[in-house]
Amino acid sequence: MTREPTTSTREETSPEEPSKHRAGVRDATDRDRYVVGLMAGTSLDGIDAACCRIRREEGGPFGYDISIESFVTVTYPESIRDRLIDLCEADTGRIDEVCRLNRSIGALFANAAERSLDRAGIQPDDAEAIGSHGQTIRHIPSKSLGPMDRRFRSTLQIGDGATIAFETGIRTVSDFRTADVAASGHGAPLAPFLDATLFADDEEARVLQNIGGIGNCTVLPPAPDRDDIVAFDTGPGNMVVDAIVEILSDGHRTYDEDGRQAATGTPDDGLLSEFLAHDYFEEAPPKTSGREQFGHEYARQFIEAGRERRLSNDDIVASSTMLTARSIADAYERFADPYPSETYVSGGGVYNDTLLSYLREELECPIAPLDDLGMDPDSKEAALFALLAATRLDDVPNTIPSATGASEPVVMGDVSDP
């Protein structure tokens, strides 16, 4: 779970129903534009909102510059989070709940966007757009579909874009991932577009490692072109640790704050070897993962296996934390080409001191928080969707096929006018 910034707010909102339609493409200009990016991750802890200033410019792989004017986190009400957890489980998810939460989550996203604009001192009339990732409730890559394979990959994010547009009065771009899926991609990862735009170096090979609910990395060779970029989900980020802590504490805690519980335990190599044998870790990129592979059921199996090995609760939490670190290191060994000379970490995992300590032990390169490159690690993924919204309105292809597996670059995002 991501640590709440001091700007966090807690609010539950009841939405009503507007309609949705696509808008036309705008001409690109070199002026400053204010766009709010909204992101909710697989940890199901809340909504990140970044008000960004975006400008077209020469240079770099994609010709954009982006700076963050404000960042806030709106924490999900406990009732919403509980409903989302049920919705993401195969045996409790219901279609009527998809419909209800699609609207409710949309209203919460609108509230987060308004708070971000207010903190930045930007009037809604001065905002060009909102880019919303939505909340993923199901992600089905080809491996889980057997003979139907990649033609029928699918992904579903809720948080109705029309609701966001209606509530805020601001044009909203949403439902990004489905255009890439339609082009035979996984619809993920999308972060490489921002990573290459802001963080590529002319001389050093870098990895940008996000540790949210799921871990994902972008491998940037020196001075990359679009086709040079490798990116994929490394596997569990905080998701398994969070679920294990929640189960072991009977719901009293939802994450291991600062990695304190893990620090009192000892990782068990036998347990780790058993769970690192999961097929996902051997699968070559492009690949994506989610709660379908590493959700609560996986966490329950991990606890049961730990009990069979007579491990304490602290040892089980330590082992699950090492699982994240070791799976990331293993992914670099297998698939990072070139192997990075430096790694920069973002997401909630950057606050888990034990996880970072394990990661330093496992990796063969130095690691540092994304702050060292001038960006708040919490804000990166929200800023990504501000950038993707701007590129959608500019009619600029905003995918990296080498990362998603799509047949070609596409322009992602559906546009809703207020």
Image (spheres, grey):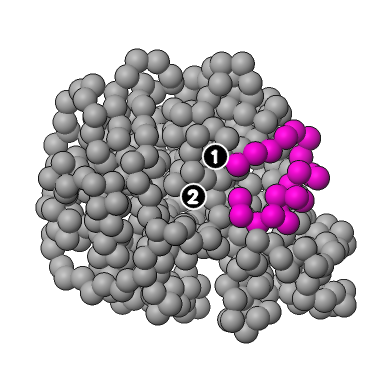
Left or right: 135, with 338 as reference point: left
Nearer to me, 151 or 277: 277
Quadrant where the N terminus is found in the figure: bottom right
Left or right: 72, with 275 as reference point: left
Amino acid found under the numbered disc labelled 2: Asp
User: What residue did someone put label 1 on?
Assistant: 371
Region of the chain picked out in magenta, as a range: 350-369
Q: Position of residue 156 (x, y in %)?
A: 39, 58
Q: Position of residue 257 (x, y in %)?
A: 63, 65
User: What residue did someone put label 2 on?
Assistant: 378
Reply yes or no: does residue 373 show up in magenta: no
Q: Secondary structure at mark 1?
A: helix
Residue 308 visible, this angle = yes
Among numbered discs 2 and 1, the one appearing first in the sequence = 1
Circle 2 crowding by C-alpha within 10 Å: few under 14, some 14–19, many from 20: many
Q: Position of residue 386 (x, y in %)?
A: 33, 41
Q: For the point 30% across and 32% down, which residue is it?
A: 54
Amino acid found under the numbered disc labelled 1: Asp
Q: Position of residue 286 (x, y in %)?
A: 57, 39
Reply yes or no: does residue 356 show up in magenta: yes
Which secondary structure type mostly characterizes the magenta part of the structure? helix
Q: For the point 58% across and 81% down, which residue is it?
A: 251
Nearer to me, 343 or 295: 343
**Where is residue 161, by image quadrant?**
bottom left
Residue 297 visible, this angle = no
Asked if the residues shown at circle 2 and circle 1 are in contact, with their CB atoms under 8 angstroms apart, the answer is no
Work out how far the residue at label 2 is from the one at label 1, CA to CA, in angstroms.
Answer: 10 Å
Q: Which mark is residue 307?
A: none
Q: For the point 23% across and 74% down, which residue is it?
A: 14
Circle 1 crowding by C-alpha within 10 Å: few under 14, some 14–19, many from 20: few
